[in-house]
Image (spheres, rainbow, N blue to C red):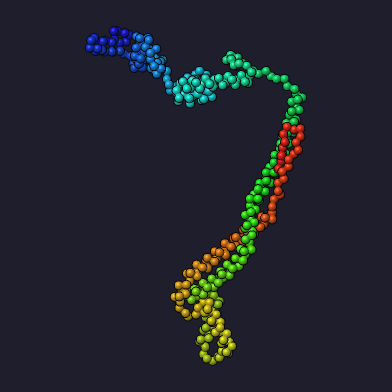
Amino acid sequence: MDFDGGAATFAAPKGEHDLRHNFTMDVWEPIEAALPYCLDPALFGRASADERRQLLFTVTGASAKTSDIVEAMKQRGLAEDVINAVTPMLRSGFPAAAKYAEERCRDAKAAWKAVTGETYGHKKAEDWAATAPEVDTAELEQMATQAEALKSKLGTEQQRLGAAEQCWKAWTTYQQQAEADAKAFAKLESLEKKLDHDQSDLLKWQDKVKVLEGMAGTGPRVGLVHDLAACLDDVYNEGDNSFTIPADLDARILAAFRQYEAAHGPLDARADPEAAAQLPEAIRARDLMQSAVNNTRRDIEAAKAAGARMGQAPKRPQKKTLAKSNRPSTHSNVN
């Protein structure tokens, strides 16, 4: 068989066949797809929906790409918002997109009728315009005056509302804090007693640490007290016997030395191992008492602040209900 641009052969009974043509694949593909349906037109009716769709795409050169469909809708003059609404539905296929577009079309016609009071018509809608209503200028001016008055009243009421909300917020916060403040303030007396006790213990441990530091040989032996003790010791022990110390003065000197050594250890004493062993525990006890004193002072300040807040209660809001009148609603204000 010869045809424009090529020839085909078929040999019976073996079925050997050959096809030659000078068409490009883009030209030959739709010819090849349509030929069976041209030889047997009834085949198109027996084909499935997918087969018919594939044939039509091939023969017409149509594209199922979203970008091509969007471009085709633009060429038809569709509005941008319509295109943006329909495009996502193309992911579900043409039938779903078409159904969605039909529903949007019905909704738009119904909305147009609701606004115009008329049945939608394509030609009618192009130049349809609403009939301008008659306007009573005097009534319009009166309404504008009333609107300004209402705006002014609205501003005033908004200020009142803001003040009422601030009052209510302050009262609510006070109520929420009142119980905790009362409990905190009730502890003030016991906290002050505890502070006195803790400070007394702190002084004892501070003195204890100083004594142990002196006995352990770690205490600082500098300052006026230590210098006087050293000078007095030199005078007492290194005299040339030309001066006799009166008995009462001698007793006072010895008493002063005993007090010094009790607090700082002997001037010439070496480190006391027992004192050195006790010193770390004494330092820890002193530091714990210092922490306890600091915490108690903090709690006392908090209790005093709670007591101050208790004496500064805000004004309690009063709920006022306006009596019913001929107005359509009843209002209530909280001041």
Q: Residue at x 70, y 46 (%)?
A: 317
Residue 236: percent from left, percent from top: 53, 86
Q: In this view of the protein, which residue sits in the foreground, 72 or 38?
A: 38
Q: In this view, does 111 lie above or below 242?
A: above
Question: Does residue 221 lie above or below 136 as drawn?
Answer: below
User: Within the image, what quadrant is residue 334 found in?
Assistant: top right
Q: Please state, as top left, top right, bottom left or bottom right, where the C terminus lies in the image.
A: top right
Write down the quadrant of residue 332 in the picture: top right
Q: Quadrant of residue 129?
A: top right
| The N terminus sits in image quarter | top left
* Viewer-proximal residue among 239 and 46: 46
155 over 297 or under it: above or below: above
**x then y, percent, for residue 97:** 48, 22
From this view, report whether residue 145 is shown above or below residue 134.
Answer: below
- Would residue 16 appear left or right of 323 to someone viewing this image? left
Numbered marks: total: 0
Q: Residue furthest left?
A: 14
Q: In this view, does 23 lie to the left or right of 75?
A: left
Specify the farthest residue to the top.
Answer: 2
The reply to whether residue 146 is in sight is yes
Residue 199 place in picture, x, y as percent: 58, 68
Q: Is residue 159 visible?
A: no
Most distant residue in the front direction: 324
| Residue at 58% over, 90% down | 246
Which of the two residues, 157 or 76, is positioned nearer the viewer here?
A: 157
**x, y (%) of residue 117?**
64, 18
- Determine the residue positioned at 37% across, 10% down: 42
Q: Residue placed at 47% from the left, 19% from the top?
A: 72
